[in-house]
Amino acid sequence: MKPSIALVGDYSAEVIAHRAIPRALELANGDAGAAVGWTWVHTRELRDPARDLANYSAVWVVPRSPYENMAGVLDAIRWARETKRPLLGSCGGFQHLVIEFARNRAGIAAADHAETNPDGPALVVEPLACSLVEQTSALRFTAGSRLREIYGCDATTEGYHCRYGVNPLYRAQLERAGLKFTAFDETGEIRGAELPAGEHPFFIGTLFQSERRALKGEVPPLARALVQAAGAFA
């Protein structure tokens, strides 16, 4: 299998993160000495991830929700989790990673997103107390986490474009099922999650959009790590 990444989302040139992601992967390839390809996969094209994504060695669920085909996105995340495909979810991708895990691993069958179903009985993803649209914020990583390892530091600053985050009422139930919350802002609000390396080689979600670093000529640590994981899987 030639290493390649499926960029799952509804592409728009007007979305800053969508413009940044190809540049992030170019910089990551150069920094890692890799040659990992990528293809945009519109969510309307997702019917059967085992067929539609079989030729990809990693999946990046990109920002900009609601997705045209939310069910297809959730199926793709579950497929990547269960087949051990490296998966990165940023912003909306992170939010849907949490919903998929809640529904299929944590026993929260009605888990949903306040953006698409505001009257849902189990809003695992809810509106943020303060919008993070075009904001930057300091972050800290949990010691021993994959995020801490990837960044090589305990804290950093990243950019956002989001209005929704993880509902803390469900945190304990998600953690009991195995999801690790490993990135937090200065007030302790959840900003990232992952599965332990022993359970999955690369299953990471972040509310922040680290790909934006590429627009300043910086190699985004998560893009580099995903490129490396895709190459290792292939």
Image (cartoon, grey):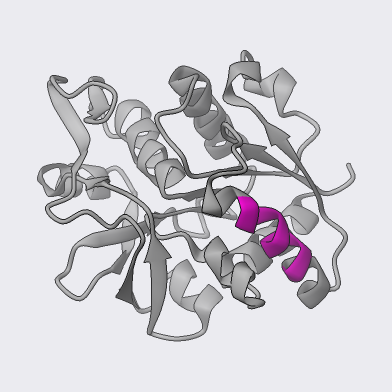
Instruction: Write the residue at 63% across / 63% down.
Output: 223
Whole-percent x, y for residue 213 in the image: 56, 71
Q: Is residue 124 above or below residue 42?
A: below
Q: Is residue 180 above or below residue 147?
A: above
Whole-percent x, y for residue 3 in the image: 83, 49
Please check the rendered image and state whether residue 22 is part of the magenta-colored stretch, yes or no: yes
Instruction: Identify the residue at the far bottom of this view.
Output: 153
Please check the rendered image and state whether residue 60 is part of the magenta-colored stretch, yes or no: no
Q: Is residue 49 left or right of residue 96?
A: right
Instruction: Write the residue at 58% across / 24% down.
Output: 43
Q: Is residue 169 left or right of residue 57?
A: left
Whole-percent x, y for residue 25 in the image: 72, 60
Instruction: Write the residue at 85% across / 73% down.
Output: 33
Whole-percent x, y for residue 179 in the image: 34, 50
Residue 131 seen in render:
yes
Q: Is residue 82 left or right of residue 206?
A: right
Residue 200 seen in render:
no
Q: In this picture, which residue range is highlighted in magenta?
A: 19-27
Q: Is residue 101 above or below residue 20?
A: above
